[in-house]
Amino acid sequence: MNAEYLLKSENISKTFPGVKALTNVDFCLRKGEIHSLMGENGAGKSTLIKVLTGVYEKEEGRIYLRDQQINPRSAEEAQRLGISTVYQEVNLCENLSVAENIFIGREPKKKGVIDWKKMYQKAELLLKEKLNIEIDVKQMLSSYSTAIQQMVAIARAVDISSGVLILDEPTSSLDKNEVKKLFEVMRNLKRNGMGIVFVSHFLDQVFEITDRITVLRNGQLIGEYKTNELTRTELVSKMIGKEWADTPETVQKKIVKKERNDFLRTNRLEKKGTINPINLSIRKGELLGLAGLLGSGRTEVAKLLFGIDSSDEGVLVIDNEQIKSMNPKLAIGKGLAFCPEDRKVEGIVGELTIRENIMLALQTKKGIFNYISMKEQKEIAQKYIDLLNIKTPSMEQRIENLSGGNQQKVILARWLATNPKLLILDEPTRGIDVGSKAEIRKLILNLAAEGMSILFISADLEEMVGCCDRVVILRDRYQIGELEGEQMTVSNIMEMIAEGAGVS
C-alpha cells in the first residue's frame, strides 16, 4: 500500500436480504485531506461508512490503515484503531457537562476516582487548541446551541482518533455562520495531518471544502476525482447516472391550463434549518413536480405542507383559506393526502392487514366516534384492491407479506379512500418493479386528468418530465427556479440543479 494513503479499502462488498448494497467498492483517504463521499439515496455511502467503522461486517474486500490491514468488528474497535465518526444526529448526553461528554468512558482518574480538575483542564485545552473554541466546559451540554454540540462531538472524536475523522452530514442543522466556523475547524485539522471524510448533499459546500470527491451509485464506485477538476454539472451527471446527451426528452408536453385556480399556495413558507422560504402554487387538477438532489429539501416541503413539521414563518393558503397552524389531522380534513418516501417506516403498519391499512386515513378523517362498519370497510378495501390491481389472496393478508409495489398501492388506496383534493407523492415508484411503476404512473395521470391536484416528488427526472405540468427545482434547501412547457427537459433540470441558476 502506498504510504500516501491513510485509510484505504479495496473491493468492499456487502449484501443485505434482497439488496446488493456494495459491489467491489474502493475508497482511499489521504493524510491531510478532506474527501467527500457523494451519491443519491441507495448509493451505498452509509453502508461503506459503517463497514469502515465496524458497524457492518464486510463480506469481501480489505481495509488498510497506515499500511496495516484491519478488520474492525465494532465502532468501539474502529475508534481504538483511530477511526472516529460524528453522525448527523449528535450522539451525546445533554444532561452531562461538555467535559463529561468529551471524556465519557475515558475520564482521567486519580486514586481510582475521577480527577475533575484535570478533566476540565484537558477539555478546555482540547477545544482551544484543536477547534479554537473557548466555552465553559463545566456547563451542561444542553445549554449550548446545536452548532456547539456538534463541535463538542467533533472534539471527542478528534481526541479519540489517531488520524481519521468521518463527518456524516455535519452541516444539516447549521446556519451559514456556523458552517463557516465548522469549515475553519476542518481546515485546521487538515493542516495538522488528519484525514477527513465529509458526507454532505450540499454541492456548494462540497466544492468549497473538499480536495477530492468519490462518487457511488447503486452500490458501485463511479470514480474518484479531484474537486478542482470536476464541474458541478459533471458531478450531478455522475450521481444521477445521466449525461446531457443521454437524456431523452418527452416530445409531447402537457399544456397547463392557465385558467385553473390555485388549490394551494405558499408565501415564503419556511422552517429554519430545514427549508428556506419557498413560494409554491399548486393549481386545481395540476401535476406539479418537485425536483432536486437528496437533501435539497423536497421531502421537507412535503412534510411542511401536510403539517408533520411546523413552519416558523410564511403563509399557507388552501382553497382560499389561510391556515395558521397546520397539522396532519387538519390537513386530511382540508383534503390533503400524503404518501411518504419511506413506505416501510412511515407508510405501512406491517402487523395490520391490507384492509386495516387502507382504512387508517379515512377512519382518522371521520373521527374515532364515527366507526366505519366492517361491511363498509370490506367494500372500500375491495374497491381499491380491484382498482389498483393489488395482488393478494385476501384483504385480511398482513401487508408486510406483500411485495414493495403492492405495499405502495395499498398506501395509495389508503389516501384515495379519503377522496383527497391534493395528493402529495414522495418517491411513489422507488424500489418497485417495472410493471407496478407503469400502473402507478398511469393512475397518477388519470387522477390529475379527473381534477385532482398532485405534488409529485421523484429522483427519476425522466419520470418527472413525462408526468408533470410544471417542475419546481430545489437545491441546498432553496427554491432556485421552475420550468414548464418546452423548457421542462431533463437536461435543463439537471443544469439548474448543478449550477443553481435558471437556464437561458
Image: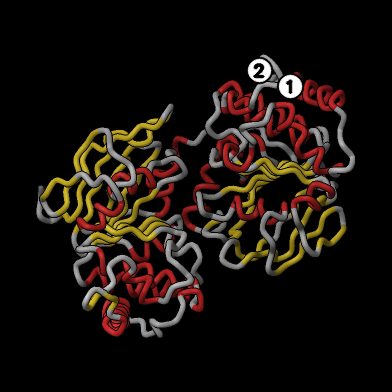
Residue type beneath disc 2: Thr
Q: How is the image coloured?
A: secondary structure
Left or right, 73 with reference to 464: left
Which mark identifies residue 56?
none
Q: Earlier in the sequence, mark 2 or mark 1?
A: 1
The reply to whether residue 217 is in sight is: yes
**Residue depicted at x 80% and y 43%:** 364
Residue type beneath disc 1: Ile
Depth check, front residue: 280 or 104: 104
**Residue depicted at x 84% and y 22%:** 379
| Residue with the mark numbered 2 | 392
**Residue depicted at x 37% and y 61%:** 86
**Residue depicted at x 33% and y 53%:** 230
Residue 253 picture location, percent across and down: 67, 36
Snapshot quadrant of residue 222: top left
Left or right, 327 with reference to 102: right
- Secondary structure of the residue carrying tag 2 is loop
Depth check, front residue: 410 or 393: 393
How many residues crowd around disc 2 within 10 Å: few (fewer than 14), some, or many (20 or more)? Answer: some
Q: CA distance from mark 2 to mark 1?
A: 8 Å
- Secondary structure of the residue carrying tag 1 is helix
Depth check, front residue: 356 or 181: 356
Residue 88 picture location, percent across and down: 45, 59
Residue 208 picture location, percent across and down: 37, 65
| Residue with the mark numbered 1 | 385
Snapshot quadrant of residue 413: top right
Depth check, front residue: 112 or 105: 112
